[in-house]
Image (cartoon, rainbow, N blue to C red):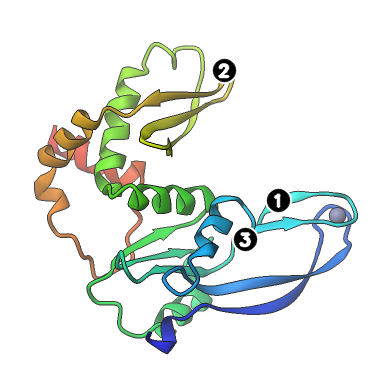
Amino acid sequence: MNEKKLTRWTIEEMACPKCGQRKKIKKYQVINVSEKPRMKEDILKNNVFFFRCDNCNLAAPLTYPCVYIDRKKKLAILMTPEIEDESKKLLHSLGDLSGYKKRLTDNINDLKEKIMIYDNHMDDRAIELMKIEYIRQLKKEMEDDELMNILFDYSGHDMYFMLFFEKKGIGRVPINQEFYRQSEIRFINFLKPGFNEDFEKIDLEWAGNIVFKRN
Ligand SMILES: [Zn+2]
């Protein structure tokens, strides 16, 4: 396996944002799940990008530049709060990534969502485009409430969208497999260029730009 793409980390000391207690944490610059398969589960279970304080029990997401690499799926996801020198240097250090699907996220939930989408052999672009359709159908629920987030999730063979409403709380709607296939076909021209040179942020905003430009 290419050495540049192997899992690497540094040990850093950080202070709890709540009580100030210092703790040594492992910060990953690269997580290669083809090399360390168990780390995928660790990310999904919030064991990796999370700060847990031994003193005040604070548990909070910890976002810093890191690249998730799945060599078998040819997937590389850069998670970074913002594109800065550190993340640029990090990408440069990985060497050649041609042939990889490259994605950009700025938070852990979106990283986890992409991992789950690709584990189900689906395309995140089709999923984001589907979200627009689902949101259209939620008009009534949104009359006196606000949809804060919508995320792909699954359990066994059942796939659904988790809906996070400001007042109503969390709900979920099943994903219709036939509808997914239709979405894939409907937007096939957009989905065709499978490989992008740059790390692309595939999210609702991306999907909205495509849908509303077309209509
Ligand atoms: Zn603390």
Q: Quadrant of residue 126?
A: top left
**Distance between mark 2 and mark 3 Cα atoms:** 30 Å
Tell me the kind of residue under disc 2.
Lys
Q: Earlier in the sequence, mark 2 or mark 3?
A: 3
Which quadrant of the rendered structure holds the C terminus?
top left
Judge whether residue 208 can be spotted in this image: no
Direction bottom: furthest residue: 3
Tell me the kind of residue under disc 3.
Val
Query: Where 186 falls versus 199 (above or below)?
Result: above
Direction front: furthest residue: 156
Q: Earlier in the sequence, mark 2 or mark 1?
A: 1
Residue beneath disc 3: 48
Residue beneath disc 1: 60
> For the residue carrying disc 1, how many other residues have a C-alpha within 10 Å: few (<14), some (14-19), or many (20+)?
some
Q: In the image, 131: left or right of 27?
A: left
**Distance between mark 1 and mark 3 Cα atoms:** 11 Å
The residue lying toward the viewer, choosing from 88 and 40, is 40
Q: Position of residue 176 (x, y in %)?
A: 27, 27
Tell me the kind of residue under disc 1.
Ala
